[in-house]
Amino acid sequence: MSEAAPESLGSEKAHLLEVDSLVKEFGLRRGLAERIARKEVAPHRAVDDVSFTLNRSEILGIAGGSGSGKTTLARCLIRLIEPDGGAVRVDGVDIRAHKGAELRELRRRMQMVFQDPYASLNPRMTIGAALHEAGKVHDRPGAENEQAFVSRLLGLVQLTDRIASRKPRELSGGQRQRVSIARALAVDPELIIADEAVSALDVSVQAQLLNLFLDLREELGVAILFISHQLAVIAEVADRIAVMQYGRIVETGPTHTVFAHPEHEYTQALLAAHPHPDPRMRIAAS
Ligand SMILES: Nc1ncnc2c1ncn2[C@@H]1O[C@H](COP(=O)(O)OP(=O)(O)OP(=O)(O)O)[C@@H](O)[C@H]1O
Ligand SMILES: [Mg+2]
């Protein structure tokens, strides 16, 4: 009998999320010259040997310029796309082991929030109905009482109950993003992957939403993978930061250390572009 009993796989000691040498390649289209010469074009590695861990209730910021592989990484984590190499483990269990109902359960535990809240909200549904439906689909406790269920979620994202009867287009950008966060929370996730979730918003609204993420971590213990091309935004929320360039993590460490002593020249360049977190944010956040 092997030493490690199967039960030990999902042990409490395992990280919530463990990413191990993850690779995702996309085939490049061959140009005419290559096709005539019957030449193969090497695939492009959008995610190239990425490894990191995330603990429960931790906020990890993923920074990096456009095309550095942040969204591709996120999509691999929730198996929207299949990686070409490496492993992703949740509670110590490889996500490839999950099929059917287990995969559905895995997806419930890891919720994504995108830059454009319209992408996750049905324009014809009221906010209340949308939030309630999200809870019902995953059979969440409390979903049998629609009003109480919706009211709790709106409270969590600091919106009033009146929002429940509105449609997405009747809300401001900031309110809409709060609703898409509430929709993610409707299924009691352990991890929220926020992909450029505040990037389209004004600085003052951004600051309010960053505070909301911090409140949610404190109240619910949810872990957050906070993806942004804006280092200054990440500095406001993340405990640790990983900087991506060309699909690789080029630097990682506690946020304050990376900001105080950036070692990689790409991190230095990103910091030079946005030297300090926006002071208006700090005022609004304090
Ligand atoms: N479905 C796809 N097919 C082919 N190439 C892709 C696909 N999705 C992404 N890529 C490529 O992979 C690389 C990483 O893209 P990705 O969207 O992950 O970057 P990103 O860091 O999220 O950028 P942004 O900050 O603009 O959102 C880019 O070169 C992109 O063109
Ligand atoms: Mg992206």
Image (cartoon, rainbow, N blue to C red):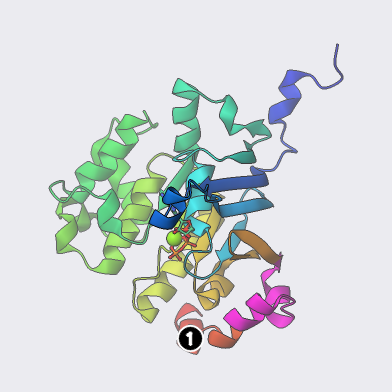
Quadrant for the N terminus, please.
top right
Q: Is residue 94 left or right of residue 82?
A: right
- Image quarter for ligand 2 equals bottom left
- Residue 256 is a magenta residue: yes
Which x, y percent locates residue 214?
Answer: 52, 63
- Residue drawn 74% across and 80% down? 261
Q: Is residue 78 left or right of residue 163?
A: right
The boundaries of the magenta stretch are 252-270
Q: Secondary structure at mark 1?
A: helix
- Residue drawn 43% across and 64% down? 196
Callout 1 environment at 10 Å: few (<14), some (14 to 19), or many (20+)?
few
- Residue drawn 65% across and 36% down? 91
* Residue 137, quarter of picture: top left
Residue wearing tag 1: 283
Which x, y percent locates residue 260?
Answer: 72, 82
Q: Amino acid at mark 1?
A: Ile
Q: Is residue 269 visible?
A: yes
- Residue 220 is a magenta residue: no
Q: Is residue 123 left or right of residue 91?
A: left
- Residue drawn 45% across and 36% down? 108
Which x, y percent locates residue 44?
Answer: 54, 53
Which x, y percent locates residue 155?
Answer: 35, 55
Q: Please name whichever residue, 121 or 50, is drawn nearer the observer in this view of the structure.
A: 50
Q: Is residue 79 above or below residue 100?
A: below
